[in-house]
Image (cartoon, grey):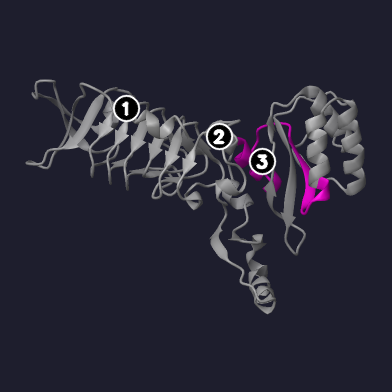
Amino acid sequence: MIDATIHSLGLGLATRNAKNEIIEVYYPRPLLSPDTVLSSLLLASCSIPSGENTAVQIDANSASTLTSALLEANFAEHAKQVKQMNEGQGQLILCVLFEDSAPLSVAEAYLKLHLLSHRLAKPHSLNLDGLFAVLHNLAWTNEGAIDLEELAERQLAARLAGTTLEVASVDKFPKMTSYVVPAGVRIAHSARVRLGAYLGAGTTVMHEGFVNFNAGTEGPAMVEGRISAGVMVGANSDLGGGCSTMGTLSGGGTEVISVGENCLIGANAGLGIPLANGCTVEAGLYLTAGTKLNVLGADGALLKTVKAKELVGVENLLFRRNSLSGGVECLPLKSSISLNDDLHSHN
């Protein structure tokens, strides 16, 4: 057998377009740092040499041979998976990542998004450079992913058959729940959590909450606002209705925004700096790195005036707007927020 130590792998079902290009892949059981014996068996059975990241198609004969080899090596669950996937719809593939380099194919990109949503890798732990250029912009329908160039023909075919092809979205990312539902979470509106989101156990995403790819929560958490790409929210934190966290994509910035543990971002508030543990941002206040604010002592006395970015890392602070002067203030919090245990411990 091939002596192989690899980063990750996945047996998946791929969808191809009319040009025979893979446009999306479903990996029911992706593996990070897989067992070396299993890795070697898969590589040998599929004739994959050690080296470059790759994805190969497994035909019916190869699948039968692979199933027997897996059973003989006491990998019964993996053998069952190969057998099931070979007998179903879609094309069985094996994607192997020898190293965590930028994804160069759809198969590689989807494997990494699955690793995140399966909680096998946390946001910012995987190389996702160039991801947008790799992914196809697709129509996500009740019949699965469809290449946009083929959509009109498929819609007509559905009408001629007396049915309707429902297009739920047109996007590069599908909703996470079409691929994986992590244990211990509640998601009120499934379309608002993209594949590649990381939701920790005890997380509740309400109807207006949103979680982007390569972002998420340690859990437990209450999400009624927006968690943008790249943002990680610490345990026992609450994002109020309509609030927003600033991502690192749209503006081209490099600052990674995060929310610490036991934090509260009030309704319709916004966050543009990393927020330390135990902090609260008052409802309606959008806090950016350059926001000038008055730092007050416990007695209310003015200590200094600084930019918000100078308080990054300082715990247990309340950021608020003075209702009389309109100025932004920061003062020490006497107590931090706590989530309602009944809402999050029984998901």
Pick the residue in front: 324 or 53. Answer: 324
Pick the residue in front: 157 or 130. Answer: 157
Residue 258 seen anywhere in this rendered image of the structure: no
Q: Amino acid at mark 3?
A: Leu
* Residue 340 magenta-highlighted: no
Looking at the image, do the residues carrying marks 1 and 3 touch, with CB atoms under 8 Å apart?
no
Nearer to us of marks 2 and 3 is 2
Determine whether the residue tagged by mark 3 lies in a helix, strand or loop. helix
Q: Amino acid at mark 1?
A: Ser
Residue under pointer 3 = 111
Q: Which residues are magenta?
A: 86-115
Disc 2 versus disc 1: distance between alpha carbons?
22 Å
Q: Examine the rendered structure and indicate whether residue 289 appears above or below residue 4.
A: below
Q: Between disc 1 and disc 3, whose residue precedes? A: 3
Determine whether the residue tagged by mark 1 lies in a helix, strand or loop. loop
> Residue 183 bears which disc, if any?
2
- At which x and y percent is residue 330? 19, 30
Q: Examine the rendered structure and indicate whether residue 17 appears above or below residue 347.
A: below
Disc 2 versus disc 3: distance between alpha carbons?
19 Å
Residue 204 seen anywhere in this rendered image of the structure: yes
> Residue 338 bears which disc, if any?
1
Q: Quadrant of residue 72?
A: top right
Q: Between disc 2 and disc 3, whose residue precedes? A: 3
Residue at 47% over, 40% down: 186
Pick the residue in front: 300 or 90. Answer: 90
Residue at 60% over, 51% down: 133
* Residue 98 magenta-highlighted: yes
Q: Amino acid at mark 2?
A: Ala
Crowding at label 3, few (<14), some or many (≥20) Cα neighbours within 10 Å? many
Disc 1 versus disc 3: distance between alpha carbons?
35 Å
